[in-house]
Image: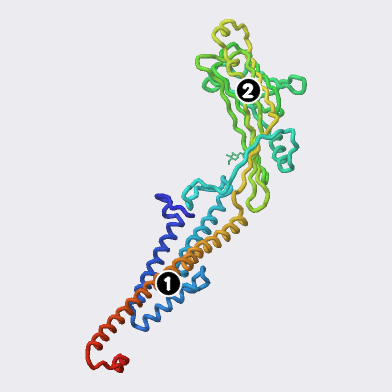
Amino acid sequence: MFRIGSNRCVVISPLFWTLIVGSLAAGILIIMGISKFIIKDPRKKRTRELIKKIFRHTDLFGEGELWVGGLASLATITLVCFAYVFSNHFIRQYPIEASSDSYFACDTTIRNAKFQTGLQSLAIPLTNTDQQMFDLLDNQALVLNVDFVNTFIRCDAISIEALIGLVRSIIRWLNCDNINSTLSLSVQLPYQHVSIQVIIADVKTIGALRIGLYGDKHENENYVLKELKFYRSFFKNGSILARNLPVTLSLTNVINETLSIDGGQSIFGGIFIPTSTTDYNSLFFTEDQFVRSTLTLTTLNIVTSETPYYVKNLQEPIAKSSEIVFQNLLFTTVCLELFGLIFLLFKLLLKPMYYYIQSKSFTYLETNINNKQHNTCSTYQDKISGSNDADINETAYF
Ligand SMILES: *[C@@H]1O[C@H](CO)[C@@H](O)[C@H](O)[C@H]1NC(C)=O
């Protein structure tokens, strides 16, 4: 409110416009001041009185005591109006996903949103609302995508097994294709935390590996399950993939909660964030290992598990409408009091000083005049006394 800034900020600065209105008011004040001395026409004098009367009615500081107060009030009203316009725009800058740049403010990045983020243990019982988001996440069907890059292996060399319970069962792929020397394979996971083994009965070499997880999105009133599109690639310049490939993927639940600005229901968003804790180097042959290797099968073992914690992000509005209304009310009264204080200062300090100085110069003037009179008297008396026919009556008459 009380800063001007530079460039674009100047034009939208409340203080700038307040100063402009203030200087206009000062201009009017000066014109009125001058007109007091030059206007002699009674009709024009009446107009002047009318203007004073109008301004006395707009005086918010001294309850209509001073017409100058009415002029200053205009400046305050400008400032306060800017505060209202600002808060009206600011309150709409929530949530952050639905807001655009704040052109009404000097800093266009300001938003009516604050964030909290925390890592929470899954051991702590969830609230009902959080539980619904977890249910959606837990029921998301995941598809495992595996790409073997730079290989001539074909799909008929591949078999897939999943560890279901204690038994290894063969499962079918959804899709398998070798395009441009990349063998792409997708498998529907029977459930989320599972161990999948891909066995390739071929001695051909593989350059690199890419593993992805895909999950469909799902929207349900206030709960949004985001589409999962995760990919992680494993490659090393100048190396080829080893024959045994242990890959672990840990899934972490990430939940966004966006509180409603008007006390309604929160909006939830959720997604899995897979992280791989596999030792990168264990997936590649060193030259030595490659020469000595006698294995003819390549085995990729992928284990997906869940981390025992989850990430919770909370978005809240900085100011709700009731707070903004209250703050505006406070700001208005503070502004009025602030300007009122200046007037009070004027009344208490400057006015008495003015009168004091005036009275001082007045008494000075008076004594001067008295002295002068005295002087003339004495000279006159001298003259009189100087003349022979001194007449008391004459002196008295004088
Ligand atoms: C959480 O909110 C952030 C910021 O809007 C967004 O980028 C992210 O995609 C959201 N995540 C979820 C899971 O909704």
- Up the image or down, 106 lies above or below 232; here it is below
Q: Residue furthest top?
A: 292
Residue found 67% across the figure and 28% down from its top: 188
| Residue furthest front in the image | 388
Q: Quadrant of ligand 1?
A: top right
**Residue at image location 40% in from the left, 81% down from the top:** 46
Tell me which colouring the rendered structure shows: rainbow
Q: Residues within 10 Å of mark 2 (few under 14, many from 20)?
A: few
Q: Which residue is mark 1?
A: 355
In x, y percent, where is residue 39?
A: 34, 79
Foreground of the two, 249 or 183: 249
For the question of whether residue 58 can be seen, the reply is yes
Residue reaching furthest to the left: 387
User: Marks 2/1: CA distance?
Assistant: 86 Å
Q: Is mark 1 within 8 Å of ligand 1?
A: no
Q: Secondary structure at mark 1?
A: helix
Question: In the image, is residue 351 above or below residue 198?
Answer: below
Q: What's under tag 2, amino acid-wise?
A: Thr
Q: Which residue is mark 2?
A: 277
Q: Where on the picture, by quarter, is residue 327?
A: bottom right
Image: 111 above or below 84: above
